Amino acid sequence: MKILAATDFSKRGDVAVERAIKIAKNIGGGSLTVLHAINSRGFFGAVLGEKLADQGEKIKAKLEANLAEIAAKSEAKGVKIKAKTAIGDPHEVIAETADQIGADLIVIGDHGGFAPSKLLGGTTAQNAIDGAKSPVLIAKSPDAENYAQILIATDFSEPSWNIARAVLRLFPAAQISLVSLYLAPAEFESLYYDVNAERVTESLETMRAETTQKLEDFRSQLNFPPATRLLSRASAYPAETLAEIASEYDLIALGTRGTHTSLSIFLGSTAEFLIRERERDILVLRS
């Protein structure tokens, strides 16, 4: 497996590299490329101008020194590590480098030049996700050695299938749970209006049963282990509900379509909320 980790030399950039090392080490025989992009449109580009290209070797030397230290501390034996620098817009450099090396996974931190405080606000990370053909892992927590518990949010769309396949391929030993939230706006109006309680209950039970059946079919068709946990929830507030469920997990996996999320129940402001408020790592795959 080929992994690309992007770093801006910040502490959170270090978290991304350390996470990538752990994944490569756990897989065994994985190769790891660590990338630093010199932002041609950022501060250094404006100040250095044509001299910017000359700084590449100096930055690469710093990258290799930092990487050697991280590798030694992490005891990343058996992991092939290569340092790479490139000049350009960071999100373009990430996508281009991932294509060049045939990356199976891209790992970025959650702030700085490579990572967001928001997924959907036009940041480098959003652009990297939009431009990448591979799953993008936003690494936030350095604590867990491996991802033991993974939550996949699904609405049964094509992006949901794709992210599920990616999780099975990348983390075959993890315990996986599948969650689908269903909204019933009219039914929830019963909280404020005089609506027949029995009809509300019956409608919600029907939706729960249909969602559970879809989850069972999803699990079966993708060959998830029988022990895969299935969660169906009715929610008027998806962001809060998903965040509450996700608190039990090491990694949250979400699928997207184009430059907008296709998981309308889960994503949009929900993904932004999870990235901004939570410490759990998030795996995103654009379809």
Image: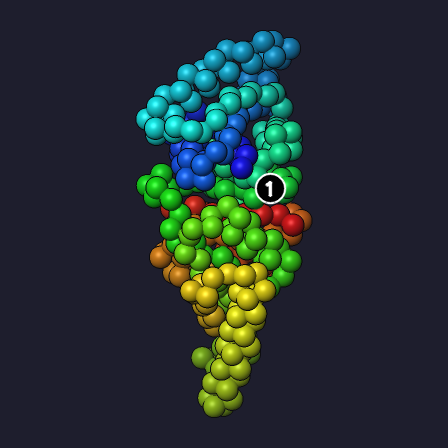
Circle 1 crowding by C-alpha within 10 Å: few under 14, some 14–19, many from 20: many
Q: Is residue 260 visible?
A: no
Foreground residue among 117 and 234: 234
Q: Is residue 135 visible?
A: yes
Identified at 61% across, 20% down, the residue is 87
Which residue lies under the disc numbered 1?
134
Above/below status of 149 relative to 110: below
x, y percentage for residue 78?
A: 42, 29
Above/below status of 7 relative to 287: above
x, y percentage for residue 130?
A: 63, 42
Foreground residue among 79 and 198: 79
Identified at 65% across, 33% down, the residue is 99
Residue 245 figure quarter: bottom left
Identified at 40% across, 33% down, the residue is 18
Q: How is the image coloured?
A: rainbow
x, y percentage for residue 73?
A: 32, 26
In the image, taking residue 109 as reference, residue 95 lies left or right, namely right
Identified at 59% across, 13% down, the residue is 52
Amino acid beneath label 1: Ser
In the image, taking residue 15 as reference, residue 104 lies left or right, namely right
x, y percentage for residue 142?
A: 36, 38
Residue 98 figure quarter: top right
In the image, taking residue 246 as reference, residue 94 lies left or right, namely right
